[in-house]
Image (cartoon, grey):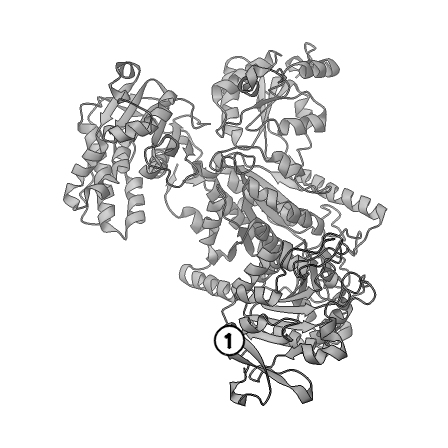
Amino acid sequence: MSDAASATTEPLTKADFQSDQDSRWCPGCGDYAILSTVQKVMPDLGVPREEIVFISGIGCSSRFPYYMNTYGFHTIHGRAPTFATGLKLARPELTVFLVTGDGDSLSIGGNHLLHILRRNVDVKILLFNNRIYGLTKGQYSPTSEQGKVTKSSPAGSTDYPINPVLFALGAEATFVARTVDRNVPHMEMVLKRAAKHRGSALVEIYQNCNVFNDGAFKYLTERATKIDTELVVKNGEPLVFGPIDDRKGFVIRGTKTEIVKLGSVPDEDLWVYDETDPVGAGILARFDHPNFPVPIGVFLDIDRPNFSESMVVQEEQSIAKKGPGDIKELFLRGQTWDV
Amino acid sequence: MSETVAPPPPEASAKPHHTVEFAVVRFAGDSGDGMQLTGQQFAIETAFAGNDLVTLPDFPAEIRAPAGTLYGVSSFQIQFGSGKVWTHGDKVDVLIVMNPAAFKVHLPDLKPSGILIVNTDAFTKSNLAKAGYDASPLVDETLKGSYRVFEVPLSKLTREALAETGLAHRDAERSKNIFALGIVSWLYDRPLAPTRTLLESKFGKKPQILEANLLALDAGHRYAEATELFTEYYRVEPAELEKGTYRSISGNQALAWGLLAAARASGRPMVYGAYPITPASDLLHELANHKNFRVRTFQAEDEISAIGATIGASFGGALGVCGTSGPGLALKGEALGLAVMVELPLVVVNVQRGGPSTGLPTKTEQSDLLQAFYGRNGECPLVILAPRTPSDCFTMAYEAARISIRYMTPVLLLSDGYLATGSEPWKLPDLAALKPVEFNLATDPETFQPYARDAETLARPWAIPGTPGLEHRVGGLEKKHITGNVNYEPDNHDLMTRLREEKVKRVQREIPPIEVVGDQSGQVLVIGWGSTYGAISAAIEESREAGLKVGHVHLRHLNPLPADLLDVIGRFERVLVPEINRGQLVRLLRAEFAIPAVGFNRVRGMPLRLPELVEAIETVARGEPLPTKDTAAEAFAGGQGVRSGDAEGNGGWMRDAFQQLWGLDRSGGNGASEG
């Protein structure tokens, strides 16, 4: 139903996706790296700029659409998935990205995140997780660790944190991934994978808030510790991590996972990752610092009919069966009489 | 028609008849007795007979309340006539009760000497006990002295009529409501063909049930003709209706169709988002059936999602519509504010019900008007419209969509439970005569500015994704005039606030001049809105027949109000505002025009009662305060500590103060003598 003239023909560049608005994030915020990476990836998607929409909720991350030279909609707190769902319902052909934070998507908007994922609405969800409320100046968030001392939890937060990847898997998402603001090449790879997925894609991006929660993911971003704490997930390959001279893998016994030194068990016993297996994804999603290395990469990528496709199928079936709607004929349906 | 079915009996009766101008019939029984279907079908027969009619379905919020209980009683009332019918009627001429509970609840509404048809089979010991009777009230001699009582063993007669079908007794008895319909159809000489047609379409795939119901219908009809109980029947001559093709329509159905027609006229697809809620769910059901109209319905996870999705759809260039009831509107408040800020088309239908909170889900009320006006943060004006009859729901739904798209503004459409489920004959409109749905779709990147405005409507352009060169961002943060960029400057916010307000005000240009029904000037101007239309219209007729100079204005545009409303008000000595709330429009009118308007308010979950309304008009015409019946004071410690005298909103000292201030008690005033 596009009223547009023919799409732009010249190849686009990163600069084409930069809007004329000044970014208003704090200097040093992890959001800058994410914005830059997203702008860089956009031309590779092969989608005309006018066919792309960025939708966000409320929070630091949700200012994102203002800085993208695409269509954009900065909506209300927690509800971005609902706007994205309606937009896809009206315009299935658009490429829709949703930018949200841990508070926006998992606290006030938890319900909507659940439903956009289970419906498999073809929207790419970038969840910036900084484990803190930034825009309201530093209260604990639903992903903050227990015991977190903040302005609103001077004695430490008593709330148990939610793991976004586990949440998405529980909501029967069809694509779930994690990446880190400081790992730009990895982020690029994950964003491209997500964009290619036909259905809802959840990408958790660990993002540093240098003002209110600086260093939350330091173990994963500092050279000194990263080698022991980062588990780069690759489909069809054994899950391995650690320095060259001390590589480790995993063996699954029953429902338990054990870290093993490479060579200490037969290679065929090592856990080879299968990103189409939701059960394996569920096990991997529970790996967390400090007991396990933290997995980054694609946890799950499976196919399921998506929301707008299914809706269009029903609509076409209805038209094939009943013909295109005729208001006059509708009025005369049932019992009428003449005066 | 199935060949297994016996030929219909002759419908003409050999018995004598009376001709009456109006009749009120009420079917009442257990929620599981099929009273709604029976009543609706009687209404269709009545429409086919050419009468004007108004219906009132009244059912409990529980799906199947425990059988036989007082709170499980469901009823359907219809008034029909050879003249204009305004309301469903107050007291009833014919009452059909299917069990003791229905008897107990509804008998007080039967006119003296009215006809009472009783299903005696249901007057068992246990049913009597559930209704709180020690012994059958039917044996009471005073009952037979007061009413014409027809004791009919409905279950038994239905069983016997269906003996040949091979249905189990219990299943056969299910058709007793159709048997009763046959009786009442005979009593008022209604055609049975429409009911046969309906039964065939409803049960076409279940031949045994179809046959049972057709048999029961005919058996009921034959029984009434044959029995010595009924010595005469009634005729109601056809009403003089405008020529055309008619159908019966309920408010919710009319709303759905009005939206469909508007979407079609606009050429935009429609997205309807809703979370199931009584009494608005039928809108979703109706629209979900019309996928071939390219209506995309979305059953959301909650009320907020429903409105979010529809705003998202509007952003994408569709007509976004969501339907809800009061509690749902409360949840939609924040998103409505966003829609006001981003200036996108959006129609929100609120089928009002009794509140606050969960309140009375299946009962009617007009108590969301102030919520519609003010139930959001910030200065957040939007257009508010209200249909006044079930069929007017078509017109106003179309109008809501048209205005919303033309002015790029959310429009709130206030229906209510009475309109939603009530039905009336509807003359099919000429689609070609409907106003076109105009809008400004931006396409030119050279001239495009997201918040540049149309000089006439102040609407900003609709720039939909997919249009090259118009990439832009909108959101809930304040916008810079013209560019739409985020802006916090004091003067800009002041300007944008005023522009949003002025845009809504400009919708006044869409409102036709006010038509005052009745006297054009005089003693009392009655101003109503919404579903009180029928009751007020009937009351105006009665008051004028009694010699009062009374006019009626029924507002369909509440925000903005019609530009000529104050002129009309000035032609009358007093203003009376009847509402099914505690005085909401009356407050707005007092605030807007600084007039001492008087409220007449009832919140019984039911339409206003005609005699009370007529009395109120007469009282106000005399310049007297409305009688105060302060039930709250009575219920609370005998009234101690509760100030009475202002219970009608403007009863005592305030009224006097206003009258002194504004001098409206002066003889002559702006009244009839100058009119």
State which chain disc 1 sits on. Answer: A
Q: Measured from the top left, where is residue B195 in percent x and y? A: 30, 40
Please state the horizontal and vertical placement of residue A219, each as a whole percent of the image. Answer: 72, 73
Q: Is residue B641 above or below residue A159?
A: above
Residue most extreme to the left: B164
- Mark 1 nearby-residue class (10 Å; few <14, some 14–19, many ≥20): few
Q: Nearest the camera: A190 or A11?
A: A190
Q: Relative to A309, is A162 on the left or the right?
A: right
Q: Which residue bears the numbered disc 1?
A: A277
In the rendered view of the protein, which quadrant contains the N terminus of chain A? bottom right
Instruction: From the viewer's side, name the closer residue of B480 and A119.
Output: A119
Please report the residue visible at 65 percent of the width from the left and 55 percent of the height from the top.
Answer: A158
Quadrant assignment, res A59: bottom right
Task: Examine the rendering and report whether any part of residue B396 can be seen.
Answer: no
Q: Which of the pair A130/B597 is nearer the observer?
A: A130
Q: Secondary structure at mark 1?
A: loop
Q: Is residue B204 visible?
A: yes
Name the image quarter holding the C terminus of chain A. top left
Res. A68 image quadrant: bottom right
Image x and y of residue B411, in percent:
62, 44
> Which residue is at the far top?
B667
Q: Compared to B41, does B452 lie above or below?
A: below
**Vertical relation: B487 (above or below) A223:** above
* Number of marks: 1
Q: Is residue A133 above or below residue B233?
A: below
The three-letter amino acid code for the residue at tag 1 is Asp
